[in-house]
Image (cartoon, rainbow, N blue to C red):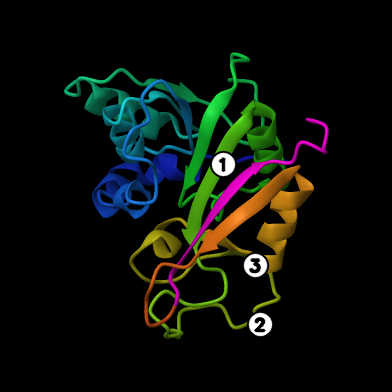
Amino acid sequence: MATTPRYDSQADWYLDYTRNWGAILSDHLPQSLTGRRVLDLCCGYGTLSRTLAERGADVVGVDLSIRLIERARQLQESAPAVISYLVGDAATTDWWDGRPFDLVISNMALMDVDDLDGVLTSVRRVLAPSGRFTFVLFHPCFPGDGRARPSWPDGGYSQEGWWTTGEEGVRGHVGAHHRMLSTYLNAVTGAGLTIDRVTEPPAPVPTLLIADCRPDRSEPVG
């Protein structure tokens, strides 16, 4: 499946819009990551990558957008930690040097990728046998603030596909895949990963979904 770097044309806007997105997962992750090799998959311009490095991790950030990776490298120049930023497709492992990761993180990215199965298969391949995979995404069952809007596509929850809105935000500027919750969960387990815990951060209407996973050792690595 072809993968499109949609964020290249929106890199400057995306930098301003998502400055605080790294905080979504920062409280969910260990405060100390010293000695651990961590992959920030679909890292954007590296907000979370820098937080991980500050906690002692050996961080690799991968993103398909050349412009976002260029910006991540520029921002790293003023940071003490060294992070390896790579331009690469999350649905393949062409960028991988073969050294396994103790932790793989996908921060607000799985709804953007075209080849969900390919991405999750790649995650399973690069994880160490005792490694962990944590992802966060917009909750697929609910609108973010509990309100539907006239600009949203007219359709049911089960109608999956790529869609955009006429508003501000990621879906207005870039778009996103709507997938059912079952699609995400079945794709995770189908890739040879076991879901240990699912978290819905408190909100009047659930906005985010966080999942902690590990390799299913009964499944061969693809």
Closest to the camera, between mark 2 and mark 1, is: 1
Question: In the figure, 90 relative to 23: above or below?
Answer: above
Please name the residue that numbered disc 1 is placed on.
133
Please name the residue that numbered disc 3 is placed on.
181
Image disc number at residue 156: 2
Quote the CA–CA distance across marks 2 and 1: 30 Å
Mark 2 Cα within 10 Å, few/some/many (few <14, many 20+)?
Answer: few
* Left or right: 200, with 221 as reference point: left
Which residue sits at x=70%, y=76%? 158
Q: Is residue 211 magenta?
A: yes
Say which element carries label 1.
Answer: strand
Is the Cβ of the residue at disc 1 closer than 8 Å to that at disc 3? no
Say which element carries label 2.
Answer: loop
Residue range in magenta is: 206-222
Quote the CA–CA distance across marks 3 and 2: 13 Å
Say which element carries label 3.
Answer: helix
Q: Amino acid at mark 1?
A: Phe
